[in-house]
Amino acid sequence: MTNTQTLFAGVTFIEMRLESFGYIFGSNLELGNEAAFEAGSQAVKGIMLFAVTWVLSSIVAFLDVEKNLQINLGFIC
């Protein structure tokens, strides 16, 4: 996939999630539906966790880990 396709897929995913959250949290149709609110809350928490792990993994990807990595393989020999 090219960068443009990846960006388009990401924007489409976010747009679809926002639309779903709008239906769940902002619509009178789902008013009082505890299962929908619970599912929406769990989805928001999952997306926040995904975002945090994405940021952390992006930061770690630029660190020089090879110099600091020490593996003791003495138990194998």
Image (cartoon, rainbow, N blue to C red):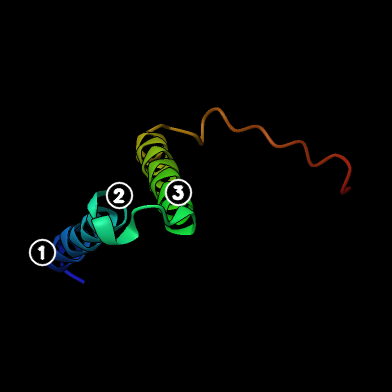
Residue furthest to the bottom in view is 1
CA–CA distance in space, label 1 to label 3: 25 Å
Visible residue check, residue 17: no
Q: Earlier in the sequence, mark 3 or mark 2?
A: 2
Horizontal side of 34 relative to 10 (left or right) equals right
Q: Could you say where residue 20 lies in the image, as x and y percent from the top left?
A: 27, 60
Give the residue at x 28% y 54%.
Answer: 21
Element type at marker 3?
Answer: helix
Q: Name the front one of labels 1 and 2.
A: 2
Tell me: residue 31, above or below residue 75.
below
Amino acid on which the number 3 mark rests in the picture = Gly
Q: Could you say where residue 63 lies in the image, as x and y percent from the top left?
A: 40, 32
Residue at mark 1: 4
Residue at mark 2: 25
Visible residue check, residue 30: yes
CA–CA distance in space, label 1 to label 2: 31 Å
Element type at marker 1?
Answer: helix
Residue at mark 3: 46
Q: Are marks 1 and 2 in contact (CB under 8 Å)?
A: no
Q: Nearer the viewer, residue 28 or 59?
A: 28
